[in-house]
Image: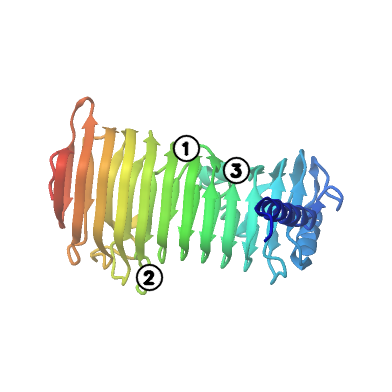
Amino acid sequence: MENPISLIFLSLFIVFINSALTVSTTVTYNVADLGAKPDGKTDSTKAFLSGWAKACASAKPSVIYVPAGRFLLRNAIFNRPCKNRAITFRIAGTLVAPSDYQVIGNAGNWLFFRHVNGVTISGGILDGQGTGLWDCKASGKVCASGATTLEFSNSNNIVVSGVTSLNAQMFHIVINGCNNVKVQGVRVSASGHSPNTDGIHVQKSSGVTILDSKIATGDDCVSIGPATTNLWIENVACGPGHGINIGSLGKDLEEDGVQNVTVKTVTFTGTQNGLRIKSWGRPSTGFAKNILFQHAVMFNVQNPIVIDQNYCPGEKGCPGQVSGVQISDVTYQNIHGTSATQVAVKFDCSSRYPCSKITLDDVKLSYKNQAAEASCSHAGGTAVGMVQPTSCL
């Protein structure tokens, strides 16, 4: 009979060897060795794409390492079917977009990953240098539309961890058409007056998790577009910004809906909105259902809880019509804090498809140390426990 102690030591030895082999088989490509210069002035795009091509072609797990320093990149597309399904960008430095916003302003994206699988972005700062474009837009001149800082499109098994995004021209981070994505420990920073600079935008994706992040920007902290399912948002601080927003939905007549969304343990400070669902005021097959907003704290938020189904910017394309988006099974639980306006809860739903199964559970929102108000139009549901302002459902 084998000695049990010998078997234990043998097992531990095998585990040790396997771990050592895993570490030793990881290949690292340092962008500095490939020609990237950390001076913030020399175009390092080719070096980054070279590192990507090498990692993509490798059969071994690969790290593309970005050392300390500032690395100037033009718009870069990271794609192609890779042999490798374990590629990590480990960023110790800062990636800098061109200071002249027109260089990438009409490219759509600055750093664009598409059709990739098993990619991780870890650490570092992404500086979009978008202030010049914001100023152009504020002046009323004809400007470039702007580039999203980081987008993953039609990709699977993605991790974005410990990344800081500064001053994006447009959106900071976009998750589009993806499955199994984890965004954790992200910091987003832009002026509260920066236009169209959503912090994290998710659409046409499933299994996305957003955790432990701080977002300060000029538009939605998190925006959730059509065809998003099984989304989990937890421990996110928002402000300044426009809140966490499902929508705009119903822009297109034929549109997939949003369902199974959880937003919990979130704070809003001085934001335009807190928890918002928004749809265009015109026909659509879209919907939003099975939504849970839980454990939210509001500090001087203009519209803490709002459903707006009459969105019609510029009164173009929708006047005189009603939203076809059906909103149901939405729960607001343990929502406390202060409103910057008298109406803290507003449900302005579709007259053709009224909101249904709305639940207010332990909601306490005040305005200037007094009771706030609630406003309901075409909304049905129930109030549970202490609800202030008094429910209008």
Instruction: In this rendered view, identify the residue nearer to me: 166 or 8.
Output: 8
Label 2 close to label 1 by CB (< 8 Å): no
Q: Residue at x 70, y 45 (%)?
A: 91
Q: Residue at x 25, y 35 (%)?
A: 341
Q: Earlier in the sequence, mark 3 or mark 1?
A: 3
Whether residue 75 can be seen here? no
Q: Which residue is identified by label 3?
A: 162
User: From the viewer's perspective, is 323 left or right of 262?
Assistant: left
Residue 256's label in the rendered image is 2
Q: Quadrant of residue 330?
A: bottom left
Looking at the figure, which quarter contains the N terminus?
Answer: bottom right
Mark 2 is on which residue type? Asp
Q: CA distance from mark 3 to mark 1?
A: 22 Å
Q: CA distance from mark 2 to mark 1?
A: 31 Å
Instruction: In this rendered view, identify the residue nearer to me: 62 or 138.
Output: 62
Crowding near the residue tagged with mark 1, few <14, some 14–19, many ≥20 C-alpha atoms within 10 Å: some
Q: For mark 1, give the secondary structure.
A: loop
Q: Earlier in the sequence, mark 2 or mark 1?
A: 1
Q: CA distance from mark 2 to mark 3?
A: 32 Å
Above or below 22: residue 334: above
